[in-house]
């Protein structure tokens, strides 16, 4: 079991971390034992303040959050957490579950809402799903970060040609839009594909979509 005081840094681990927040020491102990039994790293916290002042990991994680903590609602905690990290995976557990609260939690972006008492496997399944989703998000963010680095290596003209070409314009239309020769467009387009490490033009289009640069600039005026 891992314990951490407020503002403590959590060591990154791509296997994922489960952060349990419950003011009942018995529940924290039981959940820690459950997660330890299946090899899931976990951190148990006894209050919302400990969670809200915790330096969140940069690696995949999820939060198992009690809906009714002392002096604060789990929904309020969720709202504050979302301001720090909008895509944070939260699984609510509650001994006082009601339909309206569950709906509010899910609308707020919760991964799951599980009523106490619950089957251990139901909670484990929810945690595995949440960690898988967060792992996928981290992988996507890493890919986009790498693409941004490559895109920054393009010259302004190469970026412009990439934007227009991936928007569906023919080389001659791109040339007309930015006032250069069609042969020059072909050169810039080829350079953009090489620097972006795109094996096909379709892959370059996918990259432009991921970077939100497809059709940016003069594309609309050229169509």
Image (cartoon, rainbow, N blue to C red):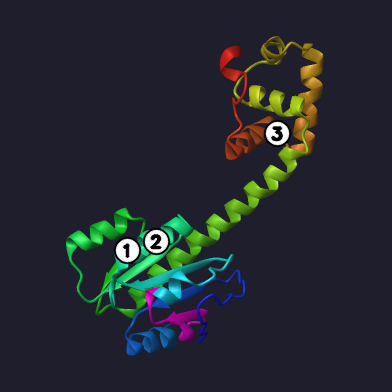
Q: Which residues are magenta?
A: 35-48
Check contact, mark 1 vs mark 2: CB within 8 A.
Answer: yes
Question: Helix, strand or loop at disc 1?
Answer: helix
Rounded to the nearest whole Å, what is the CA distance between mark 3 and mark 2? Answer: 43 Å
In the displayed structure, would residue 30 be above or below residue 220?
Answer: below
Residue 19: horizontal and vertical position, in percent?
Answer: 46, 75
Residue denoted by label 3: 200
Q: Is residue 214 magenta?
A: no
In the displayed structure, would residue 211 be above or below residue 106?
Answer: above
Callout 3: 10 Å neighbours few (<14), some, many (20+)? few
Which numbered mark, 1 or 3, is in the foreground of this view?
A: 1
Q: Tell me if I can see residue 111 in this picture.
A: no
Rounded to the nearest whole Å, what is the CA distance between mark 1 and mark 3? Answer: 47 Å
Residue denoted by label 1: 76
Q: Is residue 36 magenta?
A: yes
Rounded to the nearest whole Å, what is the CA distance between mark 1 and mark 2? Answer: 6 Å
Q: Quadrant of residue 193?
A: top right
Check contact, mark 1 vs mark 3: CB within 8 A.
Answer: no
Question: Helix, strand or loop at disc 3?
Answer: loop
């Amino acid at each position: 079991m891992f314990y951490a005081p407020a503002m403590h840094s959590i060591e990154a681990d791509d296997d994922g971390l489960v952060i349990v927040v419950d003011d009942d020491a018995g529940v924290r102990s039981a959940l820690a034992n459950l997660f330890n039994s299946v090899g899931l790293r976990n951190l148990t916290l006894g209050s919302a303040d400990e969670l809200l002042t915790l330096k969140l990991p940069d690696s995949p994680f999820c939060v198992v959050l009690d809906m009714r903590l002392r002096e604060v609602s789990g929904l309020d905690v969720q709202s504050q957490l979302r301001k720090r990290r909008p895509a944070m995976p939260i699984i609510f557990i509650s001994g006082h579950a009601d339909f309206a609260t569950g709906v509010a939690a899910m609308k707020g972006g919760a991964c799951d809402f599980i009523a106490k008492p619950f089957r251990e496997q139901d909670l484990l399944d929810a945690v595995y799903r949440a960690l898988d989703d967060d792992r996928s998000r981290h992988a996507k963010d890493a890919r986009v970060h790498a693409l941004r680095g490559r895109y920054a290596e393009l010259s302004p003209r190469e970026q412009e040609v990439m934007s227009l070409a991936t928007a569906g314009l023919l080389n001659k239309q791109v040339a007309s839009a930015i006032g250069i020769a069609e042969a020059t467009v072909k050169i810039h387009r080829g350079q953009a594909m090489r620097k972006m490490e795109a094996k096909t033009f379709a892959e370059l289009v996918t990259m432009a979509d991921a970077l939100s640069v497809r059709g940016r600039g003069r594309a609309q005026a050229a169509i």
